[in-house]
Amino acid sequence: MGRVIHFEIHVNDMERAKKFYGEIFGWLFQDWSDYAGMPYWGAVTGDEKEPGINGALMQRQSAPPEANQGMNAYVCTIGVENYDAAEAKIIENGGRVAKPKAALTGMAWQGYYFDTEGNIFGIHQPDVNAK
């Protein structure tokens, strides 16, 4: 069975992207540019004893996605403890709503956002009372 073990987020402005994800989700970054041969920052997304994966921010190698373009990549969804607080931080840090908060009835709250680099990501707050 193949399990996802790493993700990469393509970015135009590395410092802006590090600030965005660091401020909102508390991610920590390590410079792995020497290994990759390009601007590439490893993203530590949480305690390694908890479920989840780490990834990286990498310098975008082509044009960013155009507005209203269909997805041509994976979308990462990030678990949050407080959906509304996370959404407020996303907006405060330059993110935009792609698909508003909605209930996954009996399971969670889910929504999608554009980061500062034009990429789409989701946030997910478990809640058995969501409806």
Image (cartoon, rainbow, N blue to C red):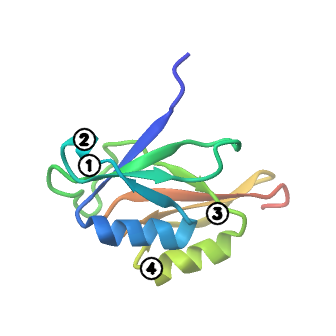
On the image, numbered disc 3 is attached to which residue? 102
Q: Is residue 24 above or below residue 40?
A: below
What amino acid type is highlighted by mark number 1? Ser
Quadrant where the image shows the C terminus: bottom right
Residue closest to the eye, 128 or 115? 115
Residue displayed at 35% across by 42% down: 73
Give me the C-alpha separation between circle 3 and circle 4.
22 Å
> Which residue sits furthest bottom?
92
Disc 3 from disc 2: Cα separation = 38 Å
Q: Which residue is mark 1?
A: 33
Kindly identify the amino acid type of the residue bearing the numbered disc 4.
Asn
Instruction: Give the left or right position of residue 99, taking residue 9 as reference.
Output: right
* Cβ atoms at labels 1 and 2 below 8 Å apart: yes
Residue holding disc 4: 93
Q: Earlier in the sequence, mark 2 or mark 4?
A: 2
Task: Spot the residue most to the left.
Answer: 62
Q: What residue would you read off at disc 2?
A: 36
Pointer 3 or 4: first along the chain: 4
* First-in-chain label (3 vs 1): 1
- Judge left or right: residue 67 versus residue 86: left
Cα distance, mark 1 to mark 4? 25 Å
